[in-house]
């Protein structure tokens, strides 16, 4: 609650403040014409949410959509519905008209698919798995061709070069990026691509940093790693620990706990390096050059987030531009803030962005009004 709640409030306030800051345009038409380019609300929007950050992801969706003037049908994840229902109650108390913000709970087949197929829904914004994102494209194609914005999975690389400064700080960023929220984060660092000359030293510092990440009761403020969201997801994450070289962790426990794990994989073709795990598992790949690191980083179906650590500013900027990802951080791990667009390349998503001014694009249509002055 020290992150989700204040960030949710900040997100809603940010988009509310932006409402009267997005201006329409006048096109340079001829002396005999005036051309106006205006935005209009897209209409009724379906919004399908993930379970990992149920309150903040709700804010990311409803903030710009309400600011744009849309009516919403929100489906929270079936595992985490109570926050959306409570926000809807508070919205009604705050004066949002009845029927503007609607929350419908249930499973994917019961609620998600009908939202995707409903002819009265004009656009859909989805955050979740790539598998489910494909289904929403199918539902749209087979119904009214509603606009679809997808923010999906990631297999996010973190490149650490031999000239990276202060490996203790690097380790803190990597550990936070890989294990925050039990690694149940679409932008989590999943592949650590590290130069051979600093690999052993960095691994030692990662292990030392993990001493400050105790596994325990999620209601205990001292715990940094809690249980995974469900027994089914626990079994999926635990399956990636079999047959791999474990440098740290690798153990599981009862009640859906997976200890923070570091795997050393032989290359980018290993299963833990290819598939989104969505748990506290970090795969290490050793390289000998920046060119090799960039090639491995981009060799994935995903392109959501990436990081690079180097003391050379020119190398950092060139690497950031070369990485095929929607957000690239330099000498840090992060996702930007309310003002910066968040979304991915390739199978991490398309159709629009969450956050920033650009988030409003998915909830508006552009209209040209052409006026003849003759």
Image (spheres, rainbow, N blue to C red):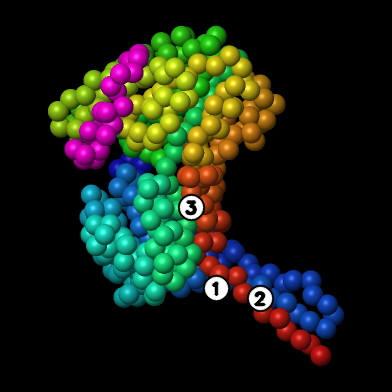
The residue lying at 25 percent from left, 38 percent from top is: 233
Q: Quadrant of residue 281?
A: top left
Horizontal relation, residue 223 to residue 357: left or right:
left
Q: Residue furthest left?
A: 254
The residue lying at 37 percent from left, 39 percent from top is: 185
Residue found at the very far right of the displayed protein = 31
What is the C-alpha distance between the residues marked 3 and 1? 18 Å
* Residue tagged 2: 368
Q: Which residue is nearer to you in this view: 54 or 46?
A: 46
Is 276 left, or right, of 38 in this rendering? left
Considering the numbered disc 1 on the image, is that residue within a helix, a strand or a loop?
strand
Q: Which mark is residue 40?
A: 1
Residue under the image location 23 percent in, 49 percent down:
79
Mark 3 neighbour density, 10 Å: few (under 14) some (14–19) many (20 or more): many
Q: Position of residue 180 (x, y in %)?
A: 36, 32
Q: Position of residue 353 (x, y in %)?
A: 51, 53
Up/down of 137 relative to 179, above or below: below
Residue under pointer 3? 354
**Quadrant in which the N terminus appears:** top left
């Amino acid at each position: 609650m020290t992150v989700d709640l204040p960030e949710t409030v900040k997100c809603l306030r940010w988009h509310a403040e932006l409402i009267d800051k997005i201006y329409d345009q006048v096109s340079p038409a001829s002396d005999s014409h005036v051309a106006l380019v205006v935005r209009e609300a897209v209409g009724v929007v379906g919004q399908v949410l993930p379970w990992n950050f149920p309150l903040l992801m709700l804010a990311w969706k409803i903030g710009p959509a309400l600011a744009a003037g849309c009516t919403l049908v929100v489906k929270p994840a079936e595992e985490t519905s109570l926050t959306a229902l409570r926000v809807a109650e508070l919205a009604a108390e705050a004066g949002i008209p009845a029927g503007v913000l609607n929350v419908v709970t249930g499973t994917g087949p019961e609620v998600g698919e009908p939202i995707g197929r409903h002819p009265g829904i004009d656009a859909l914004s989805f955050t979740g798995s790539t598998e489910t994102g494909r289904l929403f494209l199918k539902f749209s194609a087979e119904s009214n061709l509603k606009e679809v914005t997808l923010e999906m999975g990631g297999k996010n690389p973190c490149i650490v070069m031999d000239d990276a400064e202060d490996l203790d700080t690097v380790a803190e960023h990597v550990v936070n990026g890989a294990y925050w929220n039990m690694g149940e984060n679409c932008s989590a660092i999943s592949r650590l691509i590290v130069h051979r000359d600093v690999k052993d030293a960095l691994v030692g510092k990662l292990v030392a940093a993990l001493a400050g990440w105790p596994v325990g009761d999620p209601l205990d403020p001292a715990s940094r790693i809690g249980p995974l969201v469900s027994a089914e997801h626990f079994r999926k994450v635990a399956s990636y620990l079999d047959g791999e070289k474990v440098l740290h962790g690798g153990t599981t426990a009862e009640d859906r706990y997976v200890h923070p794990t570091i795997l050393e994989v032989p290359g980018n073709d290993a299963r833990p390096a290819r598939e989104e795990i969505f748990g506290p598992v970090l795969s290490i790949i050793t390289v000998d050059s920046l060119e090799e690191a960039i090639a491995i980083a981009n060799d994935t179906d995903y392109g959501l987030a990436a990081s690079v650590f180097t003391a050379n500013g020119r190398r950092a900027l060139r690497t950031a531009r070369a990485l095929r990802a929607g957000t690239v951080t330099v000498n840090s791990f992060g996702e930007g803030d309310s003002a910066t667009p968040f979304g991915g390349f390739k199978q991490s998503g398309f159709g629009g962005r969450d956050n920033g001014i650009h988030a409003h694009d998915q909830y508006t249509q552009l209209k040209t009004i052409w006026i003849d002055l003759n």
